[in-house]
Amino acid sequence: MKKLSIILGIALISAVTLFSCKDESGIYVEQLYTNAQKELAIKECLRTSADSAVSHLCVDDGFYSYHDADYRIDYDLLQASLFDTLENHGYGYLSDTLILRTNRLAESCGGQVLSALKTAIDSLTISDLDALVKGSPDAITRYFTLMKYTELKSAFQTPVSIRMSLYGVNATWNEMVQHYAQYTTTPLNFDIQNYIVEEMLDGILTEMTIEEGLIRTDSTHRSEKTKMLGE
């Protein structure tokens, strides 16, 4: 009888412990993993998301056509000024050429883009690990964007600048500006390199956000290192 009482006592303790592990407050995750493991999970999530984003966008027809061209760099800010003016005077084909060459430029930057992302991830300092582990579906990428956007934007400048000449973006742009000046006195104040960099970076970060959501909700996207993000 004494032995049975001990067994029942152990079973009761186990049941209470199991129930507490189901606590939706996140205390279970907080207690089960060390801070080092949480930081590893967060950074591994970012690395996986970066790999996914680059593999989707920095490939042939990536920026230009991926996901029904959602990430195409199309110079929408110039549609009502430069593009329409050129179209009205028989130079609309230059706008199409600029868009295609710009996206080809962006698609060719995969190596440098991934390197810049992983350097930023490795150097990321995280002030509240639990807030990111237990946060919203995009909490990690939003924090990364807040902390590293300026650094990444700077890192993207060199590969974009080099490729603007290699892919004929500068030549096309200069020709468009020259024609535009023939038909209007309205100044064109537009930093094309800055625009390309920001569009590339925003596209990459958007794809990273999507991958983070999948890591949190779909076990097939998680590894041993990131499994806590789905608990």
Image: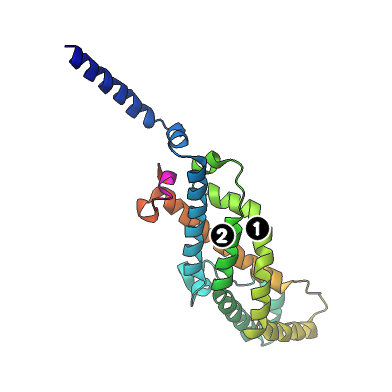
What secondary structure is the stretch in magenta mostly built from? helix
Placement of the C terminus among the 4 image quadrants: top left
Residue drawn at x 55%, y 72% is 111
For the residues bearing labels 1 and 2, Cβ distance under 8 angstroms: yes
Outermost top residue: 1
Of callouts 1 and 2, the N-terminal one:
1
Label 1 neighbour load within 10 Å: few <14, some 14-19, many 20+? some
29 part of magenta stretch = no
Numbered label attached to residue 26: none
Image location of residue 183, percent across then percent down:
78, 83
In this figure, which residue is indicated by the disc labeled 1? 149
The segment highlighted magenta reads: 225-229
SS at mark 2 in the image: helix
Decide which of 224, 181 is in the foreground and name it.
224
Q: Say which quarter of the image contains residue 168.
A: bottom right
> How far across and how far down the image is residue 4, in percent?
18, 16
Q: CA distance from mark 1 to mark 2?
A: 9 Å
Determine which of the numbered discs, if any, sits on residue 205 in the image. Answer: 2
For badge 1, the amino acid type reads Tyr
Q: Name which residue lies at 81% across and 75% down.
A: 186
Is 55 above or below relative to 223?
Answer: below
Is residue 217 positioned above or below 169 on the image?
A: above
- The amino acid beneath tag 2 is Leu
Q: Is residue 85 visible?
A: yes
